[in-house]
Image (spheres, rainbow, N blue to C red):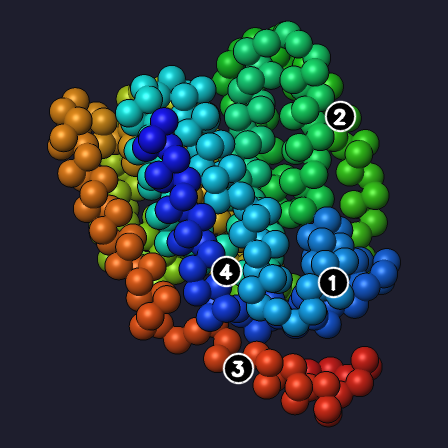
Amino acid sequence: SAGMRSSASRSTALRSASVTFGLATSSVLGVLTGSAGLKGVLNCRPPFSANMWNRCAPRLSRSTLRSHLASVSHAGASFGLAVMVALARRLRFEWYTALLVGVLWAVNPFFVWHAQDARQYSLLTALTPLNFYLLLRAIESKKRNRWIVYILVQTFTIYTYYIELFWVAAQGIYILTLRRRDVLRRAVMAWAVIGVLLIPLVYQVYFVLFQNDYQGTAASATLGELFTVFLPALLLGETATFPLSIGLLIAAGLLAALTAKKRWLLIVWILVPMALFYVASTQANLFRPRYVVTTAAPLILALVIALRDLSRRRWLISAFVIVIVSFSLIEIRDYFTVDPPKSPDWRGLVAYLEARTTENSVVI
């Protein structure tokens, strides 16, 4: 439809605009100086993520634009938008509200912010919703090929991002809520195959956690920040914050709307990964919204459901969405024009380090 095409083009434009200004230093160093080979893969990011950038970097020279276009294209601004609209339709949203979901996904400042990084987060904003879509499609059919597609895509996603396993756990709890033995049996078989395919990953996780004693580099868990930092960041961007009372009120409202409609998939999609992530963050310094960036997808779906429950009048729902989009665009404008760039002079930093360090140097 025209609305779909328009949203897709705007989504791509927002993620590509001024891409040369938004490069985090850690992203550049990861792309340009990340150690190649087995040891480099074992030592840092999940295999597909590390290999993706290490293999691309030599061919892409030192162009900020090119290294970021990989993230933009992988995330597939248009592809991710199409996935979200298709998922909304699979969840029985009417076309109008499904397109509203697409609009909110397209202008989500947190997604735009991470589309500027040479990391896997932008890719995940499309892949995780796709996995849920493929799971629902497989559940509704007895065709084996649908389960095979789900297995392959879900396995690829886990190889791209370890914490994706938290979302697989959410899928498992959702399957249990269906109380269908045939579906449970097929799902368990699918996860068993995924488990076999993940065997090579076990050694890398062991290497990172035990050989390198990885403890994370972010912050430890603080319960209140789920409502004051995480919720506003996922909905309105990295710099947004809520007072605790407002965050609790919004969270309670979204949960009430989902419970009233018996949207168990969205409930477990939000609660289970966040609970597991919170527990993990008590053991390692991981407590940053970017690690659960794909939780924004069910939050957007929940927000549209809540708006639809408030009023059946399309014009009023559209007015609420326009307000949210306006706040989002202000946040995006500030990111591109007001906020300091992620790294003002990364080229200078790279040149400085190259002149003063060796491959055995430690930079603190």
Q: Position of residue 51 (x, y in %)?
A: 75, 55
Q: Amino acid at mark 4?
A: Gln
Q: Position of residue 153 (x, y in %)?
A: 66, 32
**Which residue is at a point 69% across and 69% down the rendered structure image?**
61
Q: Nearer the viewer, mark 4 or mark 2?
A: 4
Q: Residue at x 73, y 92 (%)?
A: 356
Q: Which label's residue is closer to the chain start, 2 or 3?
A: 2
| Amino acid type, mark 1 | Arg
For the residues labelled 3 and 1, say whether their Cβ atoms are less than 8 Å apart. Answer: no
In the drawing, what numbered circle is on residue 345?
3
Q: Badge 2 is on which residue?
A: 192
Q: Position of residue 167 (x, y in %)?
A: 56, 36
Report which residue position mark 1 lands on.
59
Residue 325 image position (x, y, % from top left) = 26, 47
Instruction: Give the side of residue 151 with respect to residue 115, left or right.
Output: right
Question: For the N terminus, which image quadrant?
Answer: top left
Q: Nearer the viewer, residue 277 or 342?
A: 342
**Could you tell me if the residues under marks 4 and 2 are in contact, i.e. CB atoms within 8 Å?**
no
Relative horizontal placement of residue 102, taking residue 30 as reference (left or right): left
Task: Inspect the image, locate mark 3, and give the three-letter code of the amino acid beneath it.
Answer: Asp
Kind of residue sitting beneath label 2: Ala
CA gap, disc 2 and disc 1? 38 Å
